[in-house]
């Protein structure tokens, strides 16, 4: 309940309700894009400054390895379920599964904010883990699509270059490195822009995401009940796996929650563009609806507090 | 009296992430020029869509416009043909009159 009364979540719900009621409320696309760039820049800087203060620890290695493995392997599990229970063909199952191995930056930012408000801010290095988890799932998805298929695509170097140089990854990683370089003292003069205004601008961005998610859901023609169920089941399964691994390698409760949220989230920035390019026959309306209109709201409203409670319990149990 | 010449106008509605492929194709065929327009939104066989820059443009579309002479237009369309189905392209061809035909 406490999570639901957070201003960022309330603005997200407001956006969803407005779209549901067919309000003409819109955030201009350019502002929306600017807000997303701002948030990535701010979260990258904050993570880098934290690393600069606390230094690199063995936990970073554990969390990074876990993140990489999750990103490579979660699509395999999702693919099998999408083919059997979801009744999707190979191409669509592979495209959707890649989304569930990759991560949602906005879900992570929202979780980071909610956890920070509770005094359980995740370790700064989780930004690096987030960046690491963006692309391996794309490779897994393409290999899954290639198996038993005669489609004319290859996971070639052009696609990999475009994916690795995706604007969000470049900005996030670049800001993280800048944060490490400038440290706390260097961050102080720019803190009014990247720290003071952060929560307010996140509210505005989540208002837009609420609008976007529900409008995407309304227009999703290819979404079946089975796929809606999977859009909720995947974050639960993946989030639980992330929680067990995080607690198992000895991360604190906030960082374990962050790893769980990364595992539970589905990409709707880097992966959809890559899949549209590499698997043009896959239904973009389907994978965007599942990741953005089903999984994203589930994680923001239910997933974050759920995984946080499980993470607290697991960390206490295993410590 | 302004002199006008007939040319082919080719318009292609394409998903934003696929534009790079179209640009490469136009280079391969040595097209002299084109213009790209943002499409705000629309509705078709796949349902409604709208410009959405937050999701990396995967659900957004753009309109590619090029004016070509008959021969080059034929070459370009032949190169496009294998992609029509796979990329779900919408192609419109019309005959237009242009001023300063040497520029097209």
Image (spheres, rainbow, N blue to C red):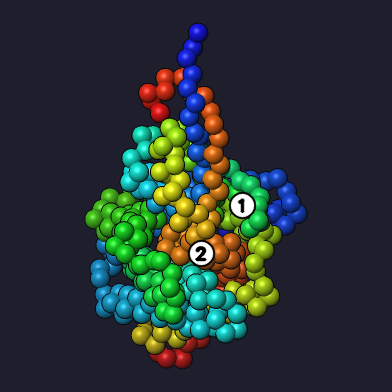
The correct choice, above or below, for B101 with respect to A84 in the image is above
Across and down, in percent, residue A161 comes to: 31, 59
The residue nearer to you, when weighing A70 against A142, is A142
From what the image shows, is residue B33 above or below residue A290? Answer: above
Q: What whole-number distance in Å separates the C-alpha atoms at marks 2 and 1?
A: 17 Å
Mark 1 burial class by Cα count in 10 Å: few <14, some 14-19, many 20+: many
Q: What element carries label 2?
A: loop
Between A76 and A257, the one lying in front of the other is A76
Give the residue drawn at x 57%, y 76%. A88
Mark carried by residue A281: 2
Residue at 30% in and 55% down: A174
The mark closer to the camera, 2 or 1, is 2
Q: Is residue A35 left or right of residue A162?
A: right
What residue is rendered at 57% in x and 85% in y? A84
Furthest residue toward right: A21
Residue A95 picture location, percent across and down: 48, 70
Q: Can residue A167 be seen in this view?
A: yes
Q: Quadrant of residue A232?
A: bottom right
Q: Mark 1 lies on which chain?
A: B
In which quadrant is the N terminus of chain A drawn? Answer: bottom right
Establish whether labels 2 and 1 are both on one chain.
no
Image mark 2: chain: A
The residue beneath circle 1 is B49
């Amino acid at each position: 309940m406490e999570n639901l009364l957070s201003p960022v979540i309330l603005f997200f719900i407001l956006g969803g309700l407005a779209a549901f009621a067919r309000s003409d409320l819109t955030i201009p696309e350019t502002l929306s894009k600017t807000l997303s760039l701002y948030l990535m820049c701010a979260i990258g800087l904050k993570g880098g400054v934290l690393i600069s203060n606390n230094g690199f620890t063995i936990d970073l290695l554990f969390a990074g390895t876990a993140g990489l493995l999750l990103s490579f392997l979660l699509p395999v599990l999702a693919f099998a379920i999408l083919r059997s229970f979801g009744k999707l063909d190979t191409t669509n199952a592979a495209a959707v599964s890649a989304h569930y191995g990759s991560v949602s930056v906005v879900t992570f930012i929202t979780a980071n904010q909610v956890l920070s408000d509770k005094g359980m801010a995740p370790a700064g290095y989780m930004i690096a883990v987030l960046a690491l988890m963006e692309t391996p799932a794309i490779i897994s998805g393409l290999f899954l699509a290639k198996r038993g298929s005669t489609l004319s695509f290859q996971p070639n170097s052009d696609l990999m270059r475009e994916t690795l140089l995706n604007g969000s990854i470049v900005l996030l990683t670049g800001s993280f490195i800048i944060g490490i370089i400038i440290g706390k003292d260097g961050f102080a003069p720019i803190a009014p822009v990247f720290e003071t205004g952060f929560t307010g601008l996140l509210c505005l961005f989540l208002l837009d995401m609420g609008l976007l998610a529900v409008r995407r859901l309304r227009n999703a023609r290819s979404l079946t009940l089975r796929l809606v169920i999977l859009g909720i089941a995947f974050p639960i399964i993946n989030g639980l796996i992330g929680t067990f691994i995080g607690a198992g390698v000895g991360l604190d409760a906030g960082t374990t929650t962050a790893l769980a949220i990364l595992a539970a989230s589905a990409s709707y920035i880097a992966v959809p563009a890559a899949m549209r390019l590499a698997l043009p026959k896959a239904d973009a309306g389907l994978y965007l609806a599942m990741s953005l209109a089903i999984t994203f709201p589930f994680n923001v409203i239910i997933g974050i507090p759920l995984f946080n409670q499980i993470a607290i319990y697991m960390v206490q149990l295993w410590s | 009296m302004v002199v006008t010449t007939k040319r082919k106008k080719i318009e292609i509605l394409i998903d934003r992430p696929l534009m790079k492929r179209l640009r490469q194709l136009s280079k391969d065929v040595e097209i002299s020029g084109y213009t790209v327009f943002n499409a705000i939104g629309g509705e078709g066989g796949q349902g409604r869509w709208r410009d959405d820059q937050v999701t990396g443009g995967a659900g957004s579309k753009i309109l590619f416009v090029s004016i070509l002479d008959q021969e080059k237009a034929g070459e370009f369309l032949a190169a496009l043909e294998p992609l029509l189905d796979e990329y779900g392209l919408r192609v419109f061809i019309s005959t237009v009159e242009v001023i300063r035909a040497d520029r097209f």
